[in-house]
Amino acid sequence: MFPYLSERENSIEHINAMCLHLFDLWCESRSVVPLTHLLRGWPLTNSDPEALRRLGNALRDLRRQHPYDAKGASFQELCELSDCVEDLLVLSSLSTWATSSA
């Protein structure tokens, strides 16, 4: 076992932890619509770009279609989570592009 995780693995762990927190929060409050969106892309079956893209699309749809919670802490967490997923996708595409052009 490796004692240190890569930056990408740390990002995946952070994303999973944030998803779990929102899942718990929305389960407690019985917020079915946000849960439905979250469960379209999470839990992550793996950390490949397609799985992250699916989660990113689900989070983006939730942010667009349900702005009524824009003042709540969960909306801020949702935005942070969505940004983390998008950042990781950008990094993945850059590394894929760099290795394919080398």
Image: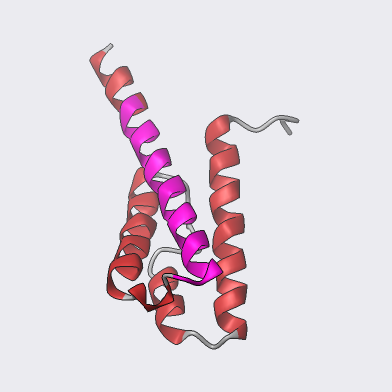
User: What x and y, as percent, mark residue 11?
Assistant: 55, 41
Residue 87 magenta: yes
Q: Which residues are magenta?
A: 71-94
| 67 in the magenta segment | no
Q: As rendered, which of 32 and 99 lies closer to the eye?
A: 32
On-image quarter of the C terminus: top left
Relative placement, left or right, of 38 versus 18 is left
The percent position of residue 38, horizontal first and vertical second, equals 44, 69
- Magenta span: predominant SS is helix
Q: Is residue 69 above or below residue 28?
A: above
The residue that appears at 49% across and 61% down in the rendered structure is 76
Based on the displayed image, in which of its 4 quarters is residue 56 positioned?
bottom left
Name the image quarter holding residue 70: bottom left
- Quarter placement of the N terminus: top right
The percent position of residue 84, horizontal first and vertical second, equals: 46, 46
- Image coords of residue 61 (percent x, y): 29, 67
Relative to 38, residue 28 above or below = below
Looking at the picture, the colour scheme in use is: secondary structure
Residue found farthest to the front: 71
Q: Nearer the viewer, residue 63 or 18?
A: 63
Q: Residue at x 38, y 53 (%)?
A: 51
Left or right relative to 68: residue 15:
right
| Residue extending furthest toward the left | 101
Residue shown at 56%/72% (left/top)?
Answer: 23
Q: Identify which residue is drawn at 34% across, 73% down.
A: 67
Q: With respect to residue 15, does 72 lie above or below? A: below
Taking 46 as reference, is 32 above or below it?
Answer: below
> What is the quadrant of residue 28 in the picture?
bottom right
Residue farthest bottom in this picture: 30
> How many circles with numbers are drawn on the protein?
0
